[in-house]
Image (cartoon, rainbow, N blue to C red):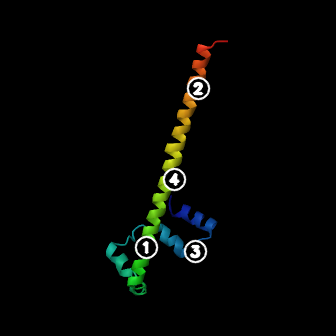
Amino acid sequence: MDKNDLQLMATKLNLQDDDLSKLCDHQKISTTAEIVNDISHNDLLDLPIKTKADTELERRLREIKFQQELRKDWILFLVKDVIVYSATVIFIFIFVSFYLFNIIFPG
């Protein structure tokens, strides 16, 4: 893919000229330091300060989520392992007893 192909794609996608130059420019690779310097420090200052009540609420929320996951795991265990396993064993016993009944009492 060369610059001409990108220009054709840009006209099809209605890209701006500066977007096209960003697509074609392979030499402008930023270093990590340049990326860090470009970050706006004002965004970091706008972060909310966590109070003790906020941390307590977050801890309580994590506990509730853990309890929900534990409850879900138990439900899945009961459905998958207990009910399905029991139904399979009962089906096998019924099938074997029917087979033995036909062997013992033919016809």
Q: Which residue is mark 2?
A: 95
Q: Position of residue 51 (x, y in %)?
A: 39, 85
Element on which disc 3 rests: loop
In the image, which disc is placed on residue 60?
A: 1
> Which amino acid, by three-letter code, is at mark 4?
Ile
Q: Nearer the viewer, residue 31 or 9?
A: 31
Label 3, label 1: how many angstroms apart (C-alpha)? 49 Å
Q: Nearer the viewer, residue 67 or 32?
A: 67
**Which of the labelled discs sits on residue 75, or is there none?**
4
Which secondary structure lies at badge 2? Answer: helix
* Residue at point 49%, 43% (across, down): 81
Would residue 88 appear left or right of 36 to someone viewing this image? right
Q: Between marks 4 and 1, how big is the CA–CA gap? A: 23 Å
Between the residue at mark 2 and the residue at mark 4, the CA separation in whole angstroms equals 29 Å
- Callout 2 environment at 10 Å: few (<14), some (14 to 19), or many (20+)? few
The kind of residue on which mark 3 rests is: Gln
Rendering coords of residue 27 (x, y %): 39, 69
